[in-house]
Image (cartoon, rainbow, N blue to C red):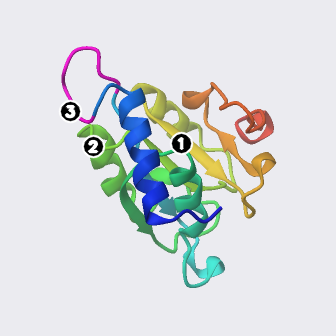
Amino acid sequence: MNRTPQQRVRRAHLADAASGGRREGLPGRVARVRVVLYDGQTGSQGVQPLASHRIFAEARDWTIVAELADDAPPGAPAMTRPLWPRIAELIDSGQADGIVTSAWTTTDEELASWLLDHHAFAVCIGPSDAPAAHTQTPAAAVTAPGHGQPDESRLT
């Protein structure tokens, strides 16, 4: 769904109001979710590899703090990918709460453990923006209403 700039501003204001305002660090305030968009297979995605990631995050009114894309070998574990240090830095420093990424081709137990240890999450989106194509890591075990259940076969 394409939103006008005015609609995006209105949604941001509504989300801010629902979370108690934009001022961070005050008691009783709920911080907005901040995410890193990451795609490790840019060659297969074409000109705009992060377009579907951006649509997914913006539909949830998540704040995008970084957009990263590289050409990692298929099946490479997350922590061996070229831009992993930047993603880890953003999560470690508290600038990001999670990652919106393309679906992993292999199970990455080390990533799932790291995310749990850092109270972070990763949402893996499939090639289409269909709700059934979305999966979440164990660190994000609570599935958003209307977005299907996590694909457990990808996590074990």
* 26 inside magenta stretch: yes
- At a point 63% along the width and 49% down the height, the residue shown is 124
**Disc 2 residue crowd, few under 14, some 14–19, many 20+, Cα 10 Å:** some
- Residue that label 3 marks: 23
- Residue that label 1 marks: 122
Tag 2: amino acid: Gln
Residue 106 in percent (x, y) is at: 68, 51
Q: Quick check: can you spot residue 118? A: no
Majority secondary structure of magenta residues: loop
Q: Is residue 2 above or below residue 77?
A: below
Q: Along the polypeptide, which appears first: circle 3 or circle 1?
A: 3
Query: Which residue is the extreme one toward the top?
Result: 28
Work out whether residue 135 or residue 22 is closer to the camera in this orientation and state it.
Answer: 22
- Judged by depth in the image, the label closer to the viewer, 2 or 3, is 3
- At a point 19% along the width and 21% down the height, the residue shown is 26
Tag 1: amino acid: Ala
Q: Along the polypeptide, which appears first: circle 2 or circle 3?
A: 3
* Disc 2 secondary structure class: loop
Work out whether residue 22 or residue 105 is closer to the camera in this orientation and state it.
Answer: 22
Q: In what quadrant of the picture does the C terminus appear?
A: top right
Tag 3: amino acid: Arg
User: For residue 101, what is the image quadrant?
Assistant: bottom right
User: For residue 123, what is the image quadrant?
Assistant: top right
Residue 71 in percent (x, y) is at: 51, 74
Q: Is residue 89 above or below residue 74?
A: above
* Disc 1 secondary structure class: strand
Question: Pointer 2 and pointer 3: residues touching (CB < 8 Å)?
Answer: no
- Residue that label 2 marks: 95
| Magenta region | 22-30
